[in-house]
Image: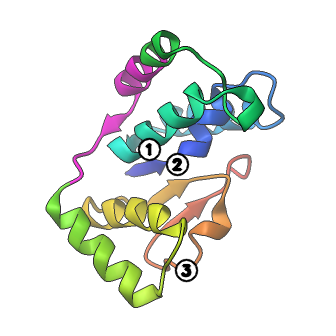
Amino acid sequence: MSVFIDTNILLRAAQPLHALHETAIHSVSSLIASGEALMVTPQVLAEYWNAATRPTAKNGLGLSQDRTREELARLESFFTVLNESFDVYQEWKRLVMSHGVSGVQVHDTRLVAAMLVYKIPRILTFDADDFTRYTQIEILRPGTF
């Protein structure tokens, strides 16, 4: 089986001093140990780059572009990066219309669209509430398995 990995998991795993760091690391490690295929989209990696290069004073990681490039390469070697196809766009459009999604939650809907197109049944996220409207997927909460 496969699991989609939300951006917040990658960010917490990259912050050794964050309270959720160990939980993120343990959850990803457990999924790998159980043979799960771990998936992300370019959107997740772009969101990671955004937060990683943003100053810490603005809720970012404050990493240099060179360090972030290294981290991105590491992530790309660790996770399967899915294509964001026209089919994903079509599914996203269907979801935002059928669920009345607006504002920043359109980004999470795009992740769900990719999951549905690629038949990925589960997402690992610290932000479970952002995905509860999508009954077609299962939400894995870090630290609960």
Q: Which residue is mark 1?
A: 44
Give above or below for 59 relative to 120.
above
10 or 89, which lies in front? Answer: 89
Lower position in the chain sequence, tag 2 or tag 1 = 2
Q: Secondary structure at mark 1?
A: helix
75 magenta-colored:
yes
Nearest to viewer (mark 1 / mark 3): 1
Q: Which residue is mark 3?
A: 133
Tags 2 and 1 touching, CB below 8 Å: yes
Lower position in the chain sequence, tag 1 or tag 3 = 1
Q: How far apart are the alpha carbons under marks 2 and 3?
A: 16 Å
Residue 41 visible in the current orientation: no
Mark 3 residue type: Arg
Magenta stretch: give its range.
71-84
Residue 94 visible in the current orientation: yes
Mark 2 residue type: Asp
- Counting from the top left corner in percent of width and height, residue 102 is at 50, 77
